[in-house]
Image (spheres, helix red, strand yellow):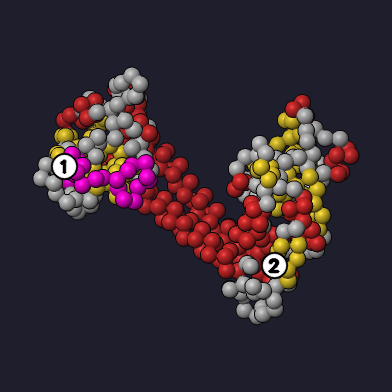
Amino acid sequence: MKKPKIRFKGYQEDWEQRKLGELGSLKNGMNFSKEAMGIGFPFVNLQNIFGNNVIDVTNLGKAMASDSQLKDYNLLNGDVLFVRSSVKLEGVGEAALVPQNLENTTYSGFIIRFRDEYGLDNNFKRFLFGIESVRNQIMAQATNSANKNISQTVLENLCLKIPNKSEQEKIGLYFSNLDHLITLHQRKCEETKTLKKYMLQKMFPQNGHSVPEIRFSGFTEDWEQRKFADFTWDAGKRNKEDLDLEPYAITNEHGFIRQRDAHDDFGYMKDTDRKAYNIVQPNSFAYNPARINVGSIGYYKGVENVIVSSLYEVFQTDNYVNDRFLWHWLKSDEFPRWIEKLQEGSVRLYFYYDKLCECQLYMPSLEEQEKIATFLDDLDHLITLHQHKCEELQNIKKFMLKNMFI
């Protein structure tokens, strides 16, 4: 194939096939003694490359180097650094662009430097060495020892398809802008998560206080201390009638998830197991007593009954509790403290429903519960929106990388 499937308007010329060795020079990095590490001059290591396509120049290590080494192993704007040796095959040959001249900076002996003498566009280079056709060539020729390795010879013989400089610039800018948008949504997502964590600390009473630091206007009454035994009940009933209900599992990250969509570690229910499962009604909580300490709890807000393993504890609340308010408290820093205090066991620790009943929390009026729950739900919605947008942009990027390169 001499042309990509998707191109910018006005470009029709065939792309040129070149070997990397024809486009510039390659040089292995330098090996440092343990005594030379951690002091001296800026130094690029493998960790600066893994998972990145551009070097973050604000996050470099240090290594002592002589004047001649600083000259021989220097780094200039447009250099590309390849991972020469990696424990995992997926890591070998990963590449990252040097975005500016780095004064008095060297690079590890586990890295190979490519210095472009052809004049490739910098942004184009950022993405060229990560496309599937290039990665497959590298991984197919990696050698085995203690690690997976590639040599300069492998890189010199990489077959690349290159368009003219103008088309390179357009392609590079397009993917650079995509990366910027992805980073923007990732940053917004993390900022919102940080805000939510802060608000969970400030909107629930801490350290024995009966009121939180931050409240909505119009609410001044003290919160009431209540035990779970006062407002919840054990709602786990066996599926004795063998009802044909959808089996669910509980994951740390997503809560309730259909068992058929869950990771293989959950296994799959056999028909003979169905009677042993517990029925979960809408608006129920369920958790794994052996994994609640790592967040294995979920709230089921579907409309149809489902079933979960009999290993799970299932409970519901009375009409004086807003379930979403309780959900956010369960995800706060306070609940894990109760788990640590009350869980039982020797080899493995468990937190059964009878122990949950001993937990206490301060609760406001139902009206204030609803306002807090809505506010925190809105933050969750924003987090989900940014996550979905990131996933959407990542999928677009993946598709376009396959179709805008050869």
Q: Nearer the viewer, mark 2 or mark 1?
A: 1
Q: Position of residue 195 (x, y in %)?
A: 43, 43
Disc number for residue 165: none
In this view, 206 is above or below 88 = above
Amino acid type of disc 2? Lys
Q: Quadrant of the C terminus?
A: bottom right
Q: Quadrant of the N terminus?
A: bottom right
Q: Position of residue 29 (x, y in %)?
A: 78, 42
Are the two marked residues, 2 and 1, in contact with CB atoms closer than 8 angstroms? no
In the rendered structure, does residue 281 fall within the stretch colored magenta?
Answer: yes
Report the Cα–Cα distance between label 2 and label 1.
60 Å
Task: Say what secondary structure mark 2 lies in.
Answer: strand
Q: Which residue is mark 2?
A: 161
- Badge 1: residue crowd in 10 Å (few <14, some 14–19, many ≥20): some
Q: Which residue is mark 1?
A: 275
Which residue: 68% across, 52% down? 141
Q: Position of residue 174 (x, y in %)?
A: 61, 66
Amino acid type of disc 1? Lys
In primary-sequence order, the first of circles 2 and 1 is 2
Q: Can the viewer see residue 16?
A: yes
Q: In terms of image quadrants, where is residue 156?
A: bottom right
Give 38 or 217, whichever is nearer the viewer. Answer: 38
